[in-house]
Image (cartoon, rainbow, N blue to C red):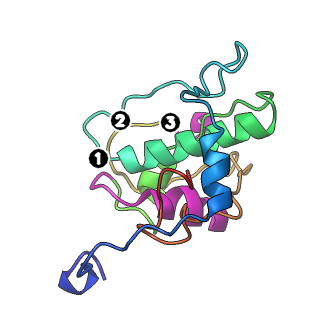
Amino acid sequence: MAGGKKSRLASRPKPKEVDEETKRRAATLPEEFDWRNVDGVNYVSPVRDQGSCGSCYIFSSMALLEARLRIATNNSERTVFSTQEVVDCSRYSQGCDGGFPYLIGGKYAQDYGVIDDACYPYTATAQQCKTSTQCRKRTYAAKYNYVGGYYGGCNEELM
């Protein structure tokens, strides 16, 4: 709907109701948790500067995928994914004009996969897509969804 009037929501969706079991389990969680220090191990990739390009939605999506990969591999895989390739090549992004993390970290990463940042370094400007044939290795996402099952369904207990 390209952000037009028909794409606007008449009212915000209500968060999903939380069952008693989920509330009980959420109550047992620690008050604080930091993936940057889990028994002295950092599972979070370095913070990067998006510059003057409105690509925060891509940076956050790539950081999420990087962290999930680090956690899944016990930090043995520490890839930094290319944000520039998404800015230039993704049909699901709006380049440097902002966009939707769900479409990038989920749908784009599932449908097309993401590549290493060294293969397509960040320039902070939208350009014509030019993925190198030497950078064929792609990492794909699977089983992505909104916390709560739908946009607006998220709440503290479900997180």
Q: Give the range drawn in magenta.
A: 96-120
Binning the other alpha carbons within 10 Å of mark 1 as few (below 14), some (14 to 19) or many (20 upward) gives some
Q: Name the residue under label 3.
A: 121
Residue 8 vs residue 15: left or right? left
Query: Residue 54 has which mark?
Result: 1
- Relative vertical location of residue 4 with respect to residue 111 in this rendering, above or below: below
| Residue at point 60%, 54% (across, down) | 23
- Relative vertical location of residue 28 with respect to residue 98 in this rendering, above or below: above
| Residue 12: percent from left, percent from top | 30, 72
| Residue at point 73%, 35% (across, down) | 71
Q: Which of marks 1 and 3 is nearer the N terminus?
A: 1
| Residue 19: percent from left, percent from top | 61, 65
| Residue at point 73%, 16% (across, down) | 39
Residue 94 vs residue 6: left or right? right
> Magenta segment: does it hold 104?
yes
Residue 78 vs residue 14: left or right? right
Asked which secondary structure carries label 1, the reply is loop
Q: Mark 2 points at which residue?
A: 50
Q: Earlier in the sequence, mark 2 or mark 3?
A: 2
| Residue 65: percent from left, percent from top | 62, 45
| Residue at point 37%, 29% (across, down) | 49
Image quarter hosting the N terminus: bottom left
Q: Is residue 113 visible?
A: no
Asked which secondary structure carries label 2, the reply is loop
Assess whether mark 2 and mark 1 are in contact (beta carbons under 8 angstroms).
Answer: yes
Q: Is residue 8 visible?
A: yes
Q: What residue type is labelled 2?
A: Gln
Q: What residue type is labelled 1?
A: Gly
